[in-house]
Amino acid sequence: MDGKLSRSAQRVQDFLAGLGGGFEVRELASSTRTAQEAADSIGCTVSQIAKSLVFKDAESGRPVLVVASGSNRVDTARLRETAGVRLKRADGEFVKRETGFAIGGIPPVGHNESLLTVLDADLRQYEVIWAAAGTPHAVFRLTPGDLERLTKGRWLDLREEK
């Protein structure tokens, strides 16, 4: 990439810059659309990827952001039991409208409005994690503590047992 961020990545960078902390959005030549692609592009483990998944609350219809470790599948039944939120799948149009970002590049921050956010407790084991930054090629580095502070999310065990 030429150093100039795309519009969506710049939006995330501007949001992060407004919070301080020295976060830097990086756009890569390779894809970060999936957790595996992101890990391969960055050179970290899949588990260090903080993937942002947007669901719809079945009761209110409002968006719910789940930030999960890239190696985990989210157990929506467990989430219903622990957080009292019954999730249903959200389509791409809903996600774009509610967050301002398309699936494949949804960051954990900088959405159109504040989202109810649940964080995968497995991410806390890493010193460094990586999150999408608005496009399928953009990422930024942060710590689990940063993730909690930036999203005001609640840590829960979300992992689906195999």
Image (tube, helix red, strand yellow):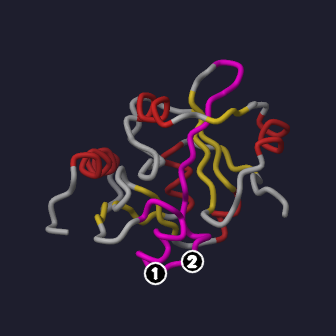
Task: Reply above or below: 29 against 144.
Answer: below
Percent x, y of residue 25: 31, 60
Residue most extreme to the bottom: 43
Identify the mark at residue 147; answer none if there is no mark. Answer: none
Percent x, y of residue 43: 46, 81
Residue pictured at 74% horizontal, 31% vertical: 85
Query: Which residue, given by chain and number where applicable, does mark 1 sit on?
Result: 43
Kind of residue at disc 2: Thr
Helix or strand or loop: what does disc 2 sit on?
loop
Helix or strand or loop: what does disc 1 sit on?
loop
How many angstroms separate mark 1 from mark 2 (CA)?
7 Å
Residue stretch rendered in magenta on the structure = 32-60
Q: In which quadrant of the rendered view does residue 22 lie?
A: bottom left
Residue most extreme to the top: 60
Kind of residue at disc 1: Gly
Q: In which quadrant of the rendered view does residue 48 lie?
A: bottom right
Query: Which residue, given by chain and number where applicable, does mark 2 sit on?
Result: 45
Classify 10 Å Cα crowding around label 2: few (below 14), some (14-19), many (20 and above).
some
